């Protein structure tokens, strides 16, 4: 067994903690250090890894094999992704779908001259769901692909509800419409509107004196976030919010339904039922960190995505063991 | 658009016909020729491709980009796989799981000096199911993987029933035990015996004068094939066999159930519901033929499996288009 892969974590929120826990499940990896914007002394880690300020990260060049970037797609990664890919192999979960092409270019332009490998947009969507959208359409070129999300807590939509005046606390769950899922599974290739695919459930704690009807109206008519969906608003107490809605479950389905050349219907379905969205995403990031390290060892530098990674590189097993045990 | 990928088909049974039909769904490919052991004039193709005798195949070196081997794993591929990989890039669906390591070595030893790329054991199991077994264990290293097959027609078991004295015709369906599937989906990590996972249904036409009880006993006690399963034998007429049991449906599930580092349960499920097993397998073979061609262009020669193929290489789309449309 060669030396362990030395992993660094940048950002210690839910995702960073999840990565720390996932590394402990992978004996070929070591958590070398955690980097944070906060005062390093303020972090309470689960492990004994050292904590450093992000400003000192450049001094770790050559001492960390892969840096896993656990910041957010909106404010952190657009800056950190290119900056750190100049110094380290990186893996991140950049998930603003519309901005992936621009982000890829920015990261590629700094990873390539640095001789580093940067895997972007890793996780389950983008990530494992993207792979299943790809496999679906290459195997069944005549067909349609459907992605459903949920039941799951949506961070972006929860934040949007929290910004409504009169809201003290809130969570939002996205739910697939079961009837729509069943129509897709049947192979009938339905055309489905946004409203037909998902519903949204909000659990809201009101500020004292806030008008429930007004808050509800502000939520359900909010453009982009709720106006195109059937949205239910439930008012609850602060205690209930803390007690019943602290977990972060998620999941969903990618279904490809198509017809092969001889006229036969074929349905491929991939589904996730996740007890913790950030922990699962973290586990995907850690598996891809192994691949980033190996790709770099093979001289495959620059920005990459899950589409570029031979699946065998994700496993600590040898190619011969994979063929014998899993093929 | 560059020139089309020139595909050859070796063997024109269900799988060969499926490949022919799948090529018609992929505009970047051309069916260059079909090779057969039979008299070429005896074949009735669906397309206008030329038919040649397999003995003449060496003369096509350099005129076919990828040869798709559609013979059987028992008698055809052990000989054809190594022989043809010396001359052409190849894709096959070798599916005798226990013999994959030896087959890989034999094919590799002839593909490598020939400068060819040979993708072995491509299809859905081995193939897409293998990939999902791999993804499951790399993302959830603490957990268990379950593979269920069916409902589907099993060719090997149907053949075994047909060899029983007194049987004129027969088909055998493998069925997953729904209760076992539900236990696995619940995340309870059950230990399941062979008998608990699948049942077997046989539809049998008796020879005139055969003893039904004797035939049934011979089937349900057959070692390896039926003794370890709950098997039902239904006696039907020859007409009913032809009318109701001519299709070749199949499918199944790969379920990975595990716990991430923070103690949360996570369940990943991949499932197939196939109207035609050979047509679906053929469609997978054709997508991987595109990858075999591209791997060879990159100088990646020798025997490979689905574990070695970056998924993006399966698609006719550019990497930039894949990132924009599917990631």
Image (cartoon, coloured by chain):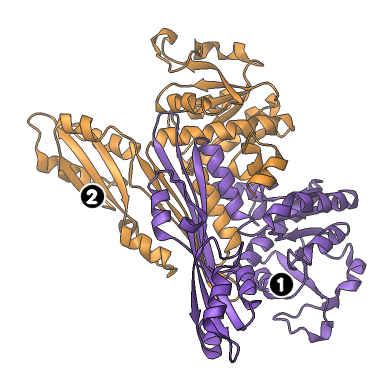
Chain colours: A purple, B orange
Question: Looking at the picture, how far across and down is residue A147, in whole percent?
Answer: 53, 53
Determine the residue positioned at 13% across, 30% down.
Answer: B207
Q: Quadrant of residue B239?
A: top left
Rendered image: mark on residue A78: none
Compared with A284, B107 (above or below) is: above
Please say if B170 is above or below A112: above
Which residue, as the protein is rendered here, is positioned at the far left? B209
Quarter of the image holding residue B244?
top left
Q: At numbered mark 2, what does the secondary structure look like: helix, strand or loop?
A: strand
Q: Looking at the picture, how far across and down is residue A130, in whole percent?
A: 61, 51
The location of residue B211, given as percent across then percent down, is: 9, 37
Q: Position of residue B198 (x, y in %)?
A: 32, 53
Name the residue beneath numbered marker 1: A16
Q: Nearer the viewer, mark 1 or mark 2?
A: 1
For image coordinates 25% across by 35% down, the residue present is B245
Q: Nearer the viewer, residue A50 or A260?
A: A260
Distance between the alpha carbons at the discs numbered 1 and 2: 51 Å
B275 displayed left or right of B95: left
> Callout 2: few (<14), some (14-19), or many (20+) C-alpha neighbours within 10 Å?
many
Relative to the observer, which residue lies in front, B306 or B245? B245
**Is disc 1 in the same subunit as disc 2?**
no
Q: Is residue A98 left or right of residue B197?
A: right
A241 in relation to B229, above or below: below
Q: Which residue is mark 2?
A: B231
Give the mark count: 2
Label 2: chain letter: B
| Marks 1,2: beta carbons within 8 A | no
Give the residue drawn at x 68%, y 24%.
Answer: B114
Q: Is residue B85 left or right of residue B37?
A: right
Closer-to-camera residue (B236/A75): A75
């Amino acid at each position: 067994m060669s030396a362990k892969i030395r992993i660094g974590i940048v950002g210690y929120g839910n995702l960073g903690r999840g990565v720390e826990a996932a590394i402990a499940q992978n004996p070929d990896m070591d958590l070398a250090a955690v980097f944070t914007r906060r005062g390093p002394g303020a972090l309470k880690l689960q492990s004994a890894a050292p904590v450093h300020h992000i400003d000192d990260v450049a001094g770790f060049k050559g001492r960390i094999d892969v840096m896993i970037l656990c910041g957010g797609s909106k404010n952190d990664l657009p800056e950190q992704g290119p900056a750190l890919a100049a110094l380290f192999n990186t893996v991140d979960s950049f998930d603003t779908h519309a901005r992936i092409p621009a982000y890829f270019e920015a990261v590629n332009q700094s990873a390539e001259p640095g001789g580093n490998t940067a895997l972007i947009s890793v996780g389950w969507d983008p990530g494992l769901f993207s792979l299943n959208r790809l496999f679906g359409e290459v195997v069944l070129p005549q067909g349609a692909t459907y992605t459903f999300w949920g039941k799951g807590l949506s961070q972006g939509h929860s934040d949007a509800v929290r910004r409504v005046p009169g809201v003290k606390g809130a969570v939002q769950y996205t739910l697939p419409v079961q009837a729509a899922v069943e129509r897709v599974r049947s192979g009938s290739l339905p055309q489905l509107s946004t409203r037909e695919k998902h519903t949204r459930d909000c659990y809201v704690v009101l500020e004292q004196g806030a008008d429930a009807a007004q808050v509800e109206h502000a939520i359900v008519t909010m453009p982009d976030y709720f106006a195109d969906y059937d949205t239910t608003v439930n008012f609850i107490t602060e205690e209930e919010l803390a007690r019943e809605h602290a977990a972060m479950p998620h999941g969903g389905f990618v279904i490809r339904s198509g017809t092969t050349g001889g006229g036969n219907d074929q349905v491929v379905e991939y589904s996730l039922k996740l007890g913790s969205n950030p922990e699962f995403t973290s586990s995907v990031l850690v598996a891809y960190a192994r691949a980033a390290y190996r790709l770099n060892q093979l001289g495959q530098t620059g920005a990459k995505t899950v589409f570029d990674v031979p699946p065998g590189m994700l496993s600590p097993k040898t190619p011969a063991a994979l063929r014998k045990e899993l093929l």
